[in-house]
Image: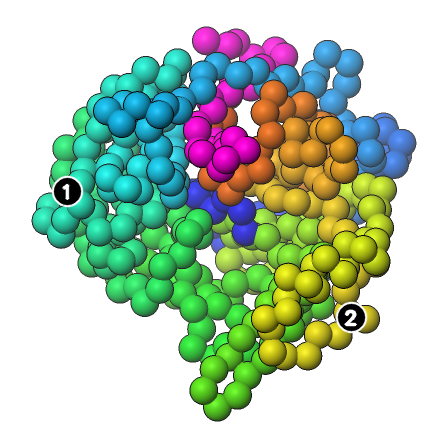
Amino acid sequence: MGDARSRLNNHPASSLILGCARMLPVLFAQACGEPPSRTGFSIDTLPSGRIEISNPQEGSWGPGEAWEVEEVYRLGSEDADSPELFSFIPDLELDGYGRLWLIEQHDQQIRVFDQVGNHVRSFGRHGEGPGEFTSVVALLWAPDGNLWTVDQRGGRVSVFDTTGTYQTSRRLESFFQMMPWLGGIDREGNFYDVRMNPDLEAPDFIVRFSDLLQPIDTVSVPEHPNGPQRFTHGDENSYTTISIPFSGRADWHLNLAGGLWVVITDRYELIRLAWSGDTVRVSRKSNDPIPVTNEEIDEALERYQWFEGRIDRSRIPEVKPQVRRSTLDDEGNLWIIPLIEGGEEDRIAEVFDSTGVFLGAVTLPVSLNTSQITIRSDRIVAVTRDSLFVPSVVGLRILKPGEGQE
């Protein structure tokens, strides 16, 4: 699922199903049977309790309600002594003051910058001692305000306070490295990690741990409704799998208010799951399909000449997935980067609120073709790359009408 740094709050499935009395006023009349106020919008509650939403193209924002995004700073330098010299940034985070915290992989450092991009401090280094890292891949804010760093290769989670002072560490048994890392911490301090299933035909699974990293339970990683979209080839000694060109995915995100959000990229379908795996809400939106040309299929298959297994051309879709990528912010809003061919590619985000209602589209000042992105309150930080793939970090501010801006 996209960016999976969002905090997962462990609530029972029943608390995820919002009744009429708790829904926003604009949804109250629709959920209780009155006609929707906007053309193309509908919301229905099925006998099972599942809520299904159909969204219009224009969204629910009225005049003067749309959000705007502006650039605040950009970090990047070729100076070898500068804290803005980056090799690779596995993860970045924002704290409650809007400060940026990021991982610089080459030096195995955590670097901190203020709201306008000034360097505040750096800490950490290569090593296996307290406060050192082997290969840190993720940053997480725990409920007590401390920063957890996930070092998969080192097999531990290290804890720091907001000054960067080492506090403690916990052993994390891990058997493979994943970037971007797809775990999180919930409001109760439970920790979530993804593990690969030894049965390659079975889905991977998410493990929920206590704050002391004792395993509690597991749930399967969500898959595409049509099953794995891939070609496979195996023999006695090896097993190889590749994604079907232009196929859809099931991008999943640990949800702030409990369970998971799953984005089915070729259907533009947002599915809310309880931790038990039950579907409690489905939100749909349809954009104009973009066809796959024969030339594009030929180019994709050319790149797969190394693959020794059978490629069934008939399984390659006729149209491209409508969603390129997605992420979840700390308020429970889903940000969808749709597929748009032309000059606006990766510079439009379609925002859905925490109930799955499409609010509207936001124009971004930079292209966000990245999995390293974090959205907190009115701030966005993301990794961007130039034509030579040199990384830099951009800090953005979200302007929300009716809300005070600092």
Seen from the viewer's position, the closer of residues 297 and 359 is 297
Q: Position of residue 36 (x, y in %)?
A: 85, 33
What secondary structure is marked by label 2?
Answer: helix
Crowding near the residue tagged with mark 2, few <14, some 14–19, many ≥20 C-alpha atoms within 10 Å: few
Q: Amino acid at mark 2?
A: Arg
Q: Is residue 249 left or right of residue 182?
A: right
Residue depicted at 52% across the width and 63% down the height: 221
Q: Nearer the viewer, mark 1 or mark 2?
A: 2
Q: Position of residue 116 (x, y in %)?
A: 39, 14
Crowding near the residue tagged with mark 1, few <14, some 14–19, many ≥20 C-alpha atoms within 10 Å: many
The numbered mark at residue 36 is none
Location of residue 216 with respect to 78 vertically, above or below: below
Note whether residue 280 is visible. Answer: no
The numbered mark at residue 313 is 2
* Magenta span of residues: 382-406
Q: Position of residue 115 (x, y in %)?
A: 38, 16
Q: Residue furthest left?
A: 129
Image coloring type: rainbow
- Which image quadrant is residue 97 in? top left
Q: Is residue 146 left or right of residue 348?
A: left
Q: Position of residue 323 (x, y in %)?
A: 69, 45
Asked whether 98 falls inside the magenta stretch, the response is: no
- Which image quadrant is residue 278 in? bottom right
What residue does disc 1 label? 131
Seen from the viewer's position, the closer of residues 158 and 123 is 123
Residue depicted at 51% across the width and 20% down the height: 396
Seen from the viewer's position, the closer of residues 338 and 22 is 338
Residue depicted at 38% across the width and 33% down the height: 93
- Which image quadrant is residue 317 in? bottom right
**CA gap, disc 1 to disc 2?**
51 Å
